[in-house]
Amino acid sequence: MKKFTKIITALALCFVTAFSVGSLAACGDSKTIKVCASEVPHAEVLNGVVKDILKEKGYTLKVTVIDWTVQNDSVSKGDYDANYFQHVPYLETYTGTPELFAVCKVHYEPLGIYYGKAAKGTAVTDGKSFIICDDESNAVRAFQLLEAKGVFTKAAEGGNYPVKEDGSLNLGDTQKTWTSTTGVTVTLVAENLLVASKKDYDFACLPCNTAYTGNVTSDDRAAVEDDKEQVEGKANILAARKSDYENDAEYKAKIDVLADALLSKEVSDFFKTQYLGAMTCDSTTQIDLRK
């Protein structure tokens, strides 16, 4: 009977403690960190190296791979503590509540221009048809890369330039193809169809992760993002709930230990060996954004 009473008392204390700090999490969850992520390289990095670092710190990391289009909502509503899949410009398009914030930058996945039906060795400036990802942040990034590599120029396009001054697309809501003043066409395609569609166009702008999962190697790459400011600005981030980080000490501790692990040398070394240098993870991308 005494043992039963102790169990009841412990459970009651657990629930009182949980509600007193404004959390619905069970007591046993204080050392469990739940993160949703894209599969490559994010989940691989979390499971391959970060999980062991956190285990040494007394935490259990649980990683779930879900579609990138729902990851911010999933963190915002509390299904996960954080996510790891996006860069700051994409996060800034998120308007859900509670607000999410970038905790730290980790690595950079270069956007590349890959050969489609154009023969290897063909200059990208000789291409007449291109496909790019149809979500706004990646589309803007692709247009900027094409301009940087000389496919078209802002000066020549004038009001036809595909990116507005505020960084948004200068296209109609339903427009899927942009045509330059010189006759170059750029078609917006869903990310999951990019690899399969590239054979129908001269070149395809593929995000690094899309190329990896589609088994498109760097040997098929004609050009790649290499601007230093671009690399830092588009580095992939760890994102978490801002209000909980500021007001919940237990949640803050979880996010801090996770961020410290992602900023470690062990993670940068993992990128070098696992991805053969194709992705960038070093002092230029591992940037702590916590105040």
Image (tube, grey):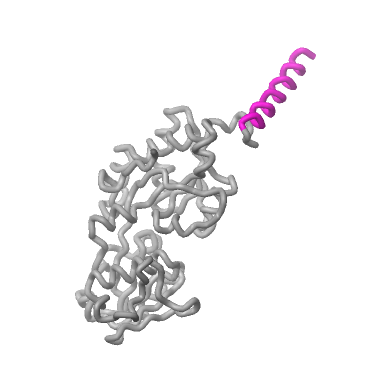
Q: Quadrant of the C terminus?
A: top left
Q: Does the image show residue 291? A: yes
* In the foreground, 273 or 237: 237
Residue located farthest toward the top when viewing the structure as drawn: 2
Q: Is residue 17 magenta?
A: yes
Q: Residue at x 65, y 37 (%)?
A: 24
Question: What is the quadrant of residue 181 in the picture?
Answer: bottom left
In the visual, does 3 lie left or right of 67? Answer: right
Residue 155: x %, y % from top left: 24, 78
Q: Residue at x 27, y 86 (%)?
A: 182
Residue 225: x %, y % from top left: 26, 62
Q: Does the image show residue 49? A: no
Q: Compared to 283, does 192 lie above or below? A: below
Q: Compared to 1, does 234 lie above or below? A: below
Residue 83: x %, y % from top left: 48, 48
Q: Residue at x 61, y 31 (%)?
A: 21
* In the foreground, 8 or 152: 152
State the extent of the magenta-drawn residues as a range. 1-21
* In the foreground, 216 or 247: 247
Residue 286: x %, y % from top left: 31, 44
Q: Compared to 285, does 29 lie above or below? A: above
In the visual, does 241 lie left or right of 165? Answer: right
Q: Residue at x 41, y 81 (%)?
A: 177
Q: Quadrant of the N terminus?
A: top right
Helix, strand or loop: magenta stretch: helix
